[in-house]
Image: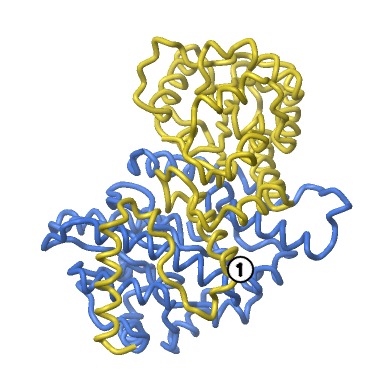
Chain colours: A blue, B yellow
């Protein structure tokens, strides 16, 4: 199957979504009463997470209120770590199957992909509160976000294989110093490019911004071997990578 | 971990990979021993399922051997039902948000989408055995596959909303009588079209076959509002539906 076709298709779906309103808000439909206990809440919330990861649910602003505890349990437990590991493994398996060329690049997102923002979201209901950019900036400016350990391990593999690492983030240019310091403190010591959002950038959303930055990379002669991100909008649209890898993120959705 | 140990680990992993071929077959990498118990197998297998649903893993011929029990537990338990329900709900929410036009069609796959083949796969290791078309044909020819109850409920909603139902299946034309009888026995009493694969069809794979059949529907004047299927190859490629819905299927992957 062609990833290209997939990307094209999903991009269309994303555009369509903006005309459709937000179906996720009516989650869940009434369930059978026999399942109405706390453990069934976990089951429903696991279904919600799965549907979000497979892009059956998108465009959500907050997680369902009943899923705060289940999301906390997921994020703070072994399953999130294992899920992150599995996706990073697949990216690693793919990367090592190729003969690395000089201008082969692998693009990583930053927040929620290479740096964890769980320390922030754990203080804000794991995504049940609406996004507050002022507060989130305070978290970013502290510069002490830890690495997501499975991504860090994969990053090291990929650097050793000879790939050029590009960090492509929606963080603004004004955050460059703190971002560089944070990346290094977390263990990401080398990169080809750190692309942040210029104040003059007028992309309407993350999808368009990241597509445009990937297009520049291609113009500069890079082959984008893989994109690794926690948001579908990190991955979709042309020019696409040879393969794209969706890390789990059940806490927020970025257009 | 020292650099020496790290390099040794990577080297071992690299050598191992070349003996194993496709990446999914080398699942999983060695995990920490503290997690080496049965419950951690379930965690790893849940990660594998999630990665497959999000198309991070594809093209697999069989499920990982260590995941037979975890897959059985998933499929026979409440989680699979809840996951199926959540995706069907999203399709329903989307469908009811539109003003239904006369030639609005919703396309369903059959096996694993409207009819359950769990009775077959439960006898064949839940996907750990390679696909055997002779045996699977015997199952199809019995004509007693039950409905997937969440899909049946959604189907009834969609029929009531006025959508035209198209069943589009990779089953061969020779299975028409038994398929019609099975659909009706399972509760699917009405449809606009039942598209099965003609003996003369020379599509190289399911993806191309289904794309071509959707193109014919569009030529005939239908608007494909949604496609609902358990395989990514049911959904991808042009012409695409307004929205596509991926039902869970951790037992097999169809190209």
Q: Chain of mark 1?
A: B
| Location of residue A136 in the rendering, given as x and y in whole percent from the top left corner | 51, 78
Residue matched to label 1: B38
The answer to whether B118 is drawn above or below residue B5 in the figure is above
Furthest residue in direction right, as rendered: A33
The answer to whether B188 is drawn above or below residue A228 in the figure is above
| Location of residue A32 in the rendering, given as x and y in whole percent from the top left corner | 85, 48
- What residue do we see at 63% from left, 10% from top? B177
| Location of residue B205 in the rendering, given as x and y in whole percent from the top left corner | 38, 28
Q: Nearer the viewer, residue A177 or B91?
A: B91
The part of the image, by quadrant, that contains residue A221 is bottom left
- What residue do we see at 65% from left, 59% from top? A46
Say left or right for B170 vs A64: left
Quadrant where the image shows the N terminus of chain A:
top left
The part of the image, by quadrant, that contains residue B251 is top right
Say left or right for A11 vs B115: left
The answer to whether A7 is drawn above or below residue B131 in the figure is below
- The answer to whether residue A213 shows anywhere in this view is no
| Location of residue B127 in the rendering, given as x and y in whole percent from the top left corner | 54, 43
């Amino acid at each position: 199957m062609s990833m290209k076709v997939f990307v094209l298709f999903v991009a269309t779906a994303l555009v369509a979504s903006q005309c459709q309103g937000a179906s996720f808000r009516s989650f869940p439909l009434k369930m059978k009463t026999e399942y109405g206990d706390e453990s069934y809440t976990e089951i429903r919330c696991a279904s919600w997470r799965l549907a979000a990861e497979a892009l059956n649910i998108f465009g959500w602003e907050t997680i369902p209120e009943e899923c705060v505890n289940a999301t906390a349990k997921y994020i703070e437990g072994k399953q999130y770590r294992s899920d992150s590991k599995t996706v990073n493994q697949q990216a690693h398996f793919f990367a090592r199957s190729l003969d690395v060329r000089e201008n082969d690049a692998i693009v990583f997102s930053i927040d929620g992909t290479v740096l964890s923002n769980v320390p922030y979201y754990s203080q804000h209901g794991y995504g049940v509160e609406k996004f507050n950019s002022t507060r989130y900036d305070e978290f970013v400016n502290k510069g002490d976000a830890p690495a997501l350990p499975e991504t860090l391990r994969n990053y090291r593999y990929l650097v050793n294989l000879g790939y050029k690492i590009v960090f492509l983030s929606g963080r603004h240019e004004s955050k460059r110093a703190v971002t560089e310091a944070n990346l290094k403190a977390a263990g990401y010591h080398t990169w080809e490019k750190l692309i942040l959002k210029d104040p003059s950038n007028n992309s309407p959303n993350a999808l368009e911004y990241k597509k445009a930055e990937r297009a520049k990379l291609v113009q500069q002669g890079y082959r984008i071997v893989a994109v690794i991100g926690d948001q579908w909008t990190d991955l979709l649209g042309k020019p696409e990578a040879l393969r794209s890898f969706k890390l789990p993120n059940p806490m927020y959705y970025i257009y």
